[in-house]
Amino acid sequence: MDKVTRLVSENGLVLFSKSSCCLCYALKILFQEIGVTPTVHELDQDPEGREMERALMRSGCNTPVPAVFIGGKLVGSTNEVMSLHLSGGLIPLLRPYQSISN
């Protein structure tokens, strides 16, 4: 949990992912299209990945990946992020993290 907490507190937009996860890939593309670059942490490439998965589940994630945190707060997985985006609520949350060129 300490590593998850540290990563979330040190970065404004964090995506916990697995390199083989198609839903994680979809969120990466969405963020790219919006013009933000999340800190992506691939759990399957981290020796502490399994413990981090358990920590994410304890923090309230329904599934360990994808898990999105914005401004230190858990937004959720693909369903929650896409619902937020379709309702118009995602871009205002991401505005502080957009590149200046957008």
Image: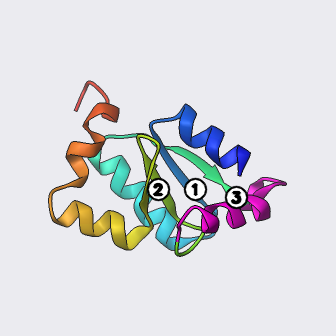
User: Residue shown at 63%/66% (left/top)?
Assistant: 58
User: Residue shown at 34%/34% (left/top)?
Assistant: 97
Residue 64, relative to residue 69: is it above or below? below
Q: Earlier in the sequence, mark 3 or mark 1?
A: 1
Residues tagged 1 and 2 counted as in contact (Cβ below 8 A): yes
Q: Amino acid at mark 3?
A: Leu
User: Residue shown at 45%/67% (left/top)?
Assistant: 77
Q: Secondary structure at mark 3?
A: helix
Where's residue 15, x and y in %?
A: 52, 52
Magenta residues span 44-61
Residue 16 marker: 1
Where's residue 64, x and y in %?
A: 60, 68
**Residue 19's image quarter?**
bottom right
Question: Is 50 included in the stretch rendered in magenta?
Answer: yes
Q: How busy is the neighbourhood of tag 2: few (under 14 within 10 Å), some, or many (20 plus)?
A: many
Q: Amino acid at mark 1?
A: Phe
Q: Secondary structure at mark 1?
A: strand
Where's residue 84, x and y in %?
A: 25, 62
Please name whichever residue, 26 or 52, is drawn nearer the observer in this view of the structure: 52
Q: Earlier in the sequence, mark 1 or mark 2?
A: 1
Q: CA distance from mark 1 to mark 2?
A: 7 Å
For disc 2, the marked residue is 68
User: Residue shown at 63%/44% (left/top)?
Assistant: 5
Q: Secondary structure at mark 2?
A: strand
Q: CA distance from mark 3 to mark 1?
A: 7 Å
Residue 6 marker: none
For disc 3, the marked residue is 43
